[in-house]
Amino acid sequence: MAYPLSVLDLASVGSGSTPTQALRNTTELAQLAERLGYTRFWLAEHHGMPSIASSAPEILIGHVASTTKRIRVGSGGIMLPNHVPLMLAERFHTLEALHPGRIDLGIGRAPGTDPATVRALRPFDAEQFPEQLAELRTLSRGEYRDDHPFRTIRVVPDDVALPPIWLLGSSGASARLAGSLGMGYSFASHFSLAPPRPAFRAYRESFQPSEQFPEPHAILAVSVVCADTDERADWLARSMDLAWVRLVRGEFGRLPSPEDATAYPYTPQEQTVVRARRALQLIGSPVTVRAGIDALVQETGANEVMATSMMHSHAERIRSCELLAESFGLRAHP
């Protein structure tokens, strides 16, 4: 079974490290992903989270694209209700002009943060997402009617178009919209408890071909912890066990180490949280992880898989990326 393999990065910040170092780690990971033959490198948008440094993905996209040569770089995603459509259009026109044919615009409707930070990001209204998306595309194309107040607005650079747009989802709510607009679709199985198969079916059933997407293209995002052995991977995955427990309690901090997570005394209720979140992850040796990904692709019909690895150690995350590429037989570039 052959399909493209890509990377989703959140610039994770482990205990004992700093966000600045995490951003440097992101650059190194992107360069490695390109050398190993991954298809895309996407960056997420999160705000006010000490364990995640990717708060400004559009800036990171430009930086990563300038330090790589071939791999597609994009947002996974830009949370549209946090942004003014005109400024977003200008930023991604600029990225497309600087790095033609290499930029992806993945768009979501969630805030990507806590309620207090949502208020600081104002305004946020996810119900207006379809209208914001339409405004973004119409501004980019300059297609307003002669009597519209925005008819004279010009998005500059005006000699390029928006890069390909992907709608991101974790519940299936955006699947039919993505299909009807002839866009790509990506489902966040790395954190969503909802099954992806119904969303992918809805996307394909509603799909209308477009210039950028003559055929439907569905990406399945998965959480991966890959190590040389199943036992080693299980130990490394304990960081996220404790991270999820703390997140459920509303506690935000750096990603804990496997040692700290192993020493933590989980209550029965917390063990239930851990089991539920472990079910969303693919943890193990290259053989184990590859078999799990193949099974998900066969079940969902995904066209592409995007792996994200929240691990305390950057070196272990690098190793996970290498092992996964090897298991898929990706072609390395010099």
Image (cartoon, rainbow, N blue to C red):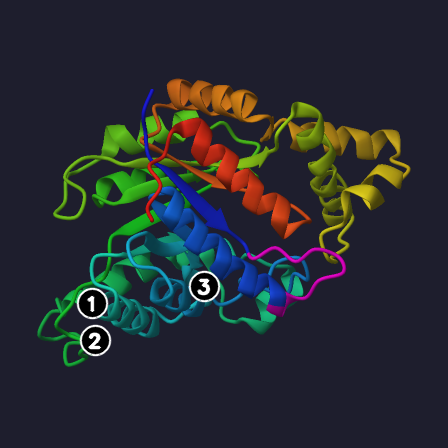
Is residue 2 or residue 105 the one in the foreground? 2
For label 2, the residue is 155
- Give the residue at x 73% y 57%: 254
- Give the residue at x 51% y 58%: 26
- Give the residue at x 58% y 65%: 118
State which region is magenta.
11-20
For label 1, the residue is 140
Task: Look at the numbered disc 3 and give the secondary structure of its residue.
Answer: helix
* x and y percentages locating residue 181 in the rendered image: 22, 46
Q: Is residue 108 left or right of residue 135?
A: right
Q: Quadrant of residue 149?
A: bottom left
> Which of the two labelled residues, at mark 2 and mark 3, occupies the earlier sequence position?
3
Task: Look at the numbered disc 1 and give the secondary structure of its residue.
Answer: helix
Please tell me whether residue 15 belongs to the stretch shown in magenta: yes
Is residue 108 visible in the rendered image? The answer is no
Separation (CA) of disc 1 from disc 2: 6 Å
Amino acid residing under circle 2 = Val
Separation (CA) of disc 2 from disc 3: 20 Å
* x and y percentages locating residue 20 in the rendered image: 61, 69
* x and y percentages locating residue 124 in the rendered image: 49, 64
192, above or below 87, in the image: above
Mark 3 touching mark 1, by CB under 8 A? no
- Give the residue at x 69% y 49%: 312
Separation (CA) of disc 3 from disc 1: 20 Å
Mark 1 touching mark 2, by CB under 8 A? yes
Q: Is the residue marked by circle 3 packed among few (<14), some (14-19), or many (20+) residues within 10 Å? A: many
Q: Quadrant of residue 325?
A: top left
Q: Is residue 223 left or right of residue 221?
A: right
* x and y percentages locating residue 111 in the rendered image: 53, 58
For label 3, the residue is 57
Which numbered disc, 3 or 1, marks the residue closer to the eye? 3
Q: Is residue 39 left or right of residue 230?
A: left
